[in-house]
Each structure stands twice: as C-alpha cells, then as structure tokens.
Amino acid sequence: MKMIKAVIRPEKVDDVVEALEKEGFLALTRIDVVGRGKQGGLTMGEIVYDELPKSMLLLVVDEEAVPKVCEIIMESARTGRFGDGKIFVLPVNQVWTVRTGAPEL
C-alpha cells in the first residue's frame, strides 16, 4: 500500500474530492495547511506573502491505484499557474484499525 499526500490550492479541494469519489476513491483526510514552494511565496508590490494557504489530502491506496489517483488529482487541481501543488507518494508499512485494534496489513 502507498500513502499519497497531495498539497493543493484550497479552492481546488472540492473539485479534487469530487473527482476522486467519482472514480471510487472515497477514503481520505483533508488538512488545511500553510506553506510555500520554490518561488518562496508570493510578492505583490512591496508585500511578500511567504506562507500561503494550502490544503493537504491524504489517501492510502493499493500500489496499482497510485498512477490513477495521481492523475485524477493532477487533472482536477491544475490551474497552470505557480502554486498548483505537489504530490508525494510514500510506502505504508502498517495499518491498524483504532476501533478494533486489528492490524490491516
């Protein structure tokens, strides 16, 4: 299994979640975060915004589903401008269900 962490524009979250649900990927966690990319934030005149609002989506999926989920996120979140986000894919070594105490892997 793999964990997908997608950091995207907050205004694109509903589009991404809807597209994922449409393809059967229902389980996810959404976290509101702040951050900046390689460009170091946003400069507007003399004002510099070095921490911008973003949203992070966390999903755990089978390894075979990773390319499809990443493509759904990219298509749904893309505006073509700086700050559209990043997707990180990490291995998941163990999963436990809190309610039952049972391991899932």
Image (cartoon, rainbow, N blue to C red):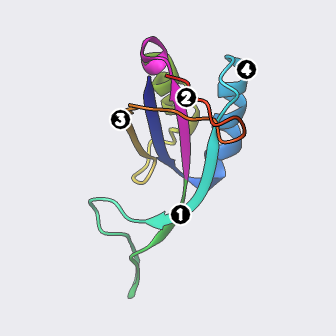
Left or right: residue 68 compared with residue 48? right
Q: Earlier in the sequence, mark 3 or mark 2?
A: 3
Q: Which residue is mark 2?
A: 103
Q: CA distance from mark 3 to mark 2?
A: 19 Å
Q: Earlier in the sequence, mark 1 or mark 2?
A: 1
Residue 3: x and y in percent read: 45, 34
Q: CA distance from mark 4 to mark 1?
A: 25 Å
Which residue type does callout 4 highlight?
A: Lys
Q: CA distance from mark 1 to mark 3?
A: 19 Å
Report which quarter residue 103 is drawn in.
top right
Report which quarter residue 94 is drawn in.
top left
Query: The magenta stretch spans which residues?
Result: 56-66
Which residue type does callout 3 highlight?
A: Leu
Q: Nearer the viewer, mark 3 or mark 2?
A: 2
- What is the total number of numbered labels drawn onto the structure image? 4
Q: CA distance from mark 3 to mark 4?
A: 24 Å
Q: Which residue is mark 1?
A: 33
Secondary structure category for the residue under label 1: strand
Which residue type does callout 2 highlight?
A: Pro
Residue 70: x and y in percent read: 46, 26
Q: Is residue 86 above or below residue 31?
A: above
Q: Residue shown at 72%/25% (left/top)?
A: 21
**Pick the front one: 24 or 13:** 24
Asked if residue 63 is among those painted magenta in the image, a careful observer would answer: yes
Dot 1 crowding, Cα within 10 Å, few <14, some 14–19, many 20+: some
Dot 4 crowding, Cα within 10 Å, few <14, some 14–19, many 20+: few
Q: CA distance from mark 1 to mark 2?
A: 29 Å
Q: Which residue is mark 4?
A: 22
Q: Are marks 1 and 3 in contact (CB under 8 Å)?
A: no
Q: Which residue is mark 3?
A: 90
Asked if residue 53 is among those painted magenta in the image, a careful observer would answer: no
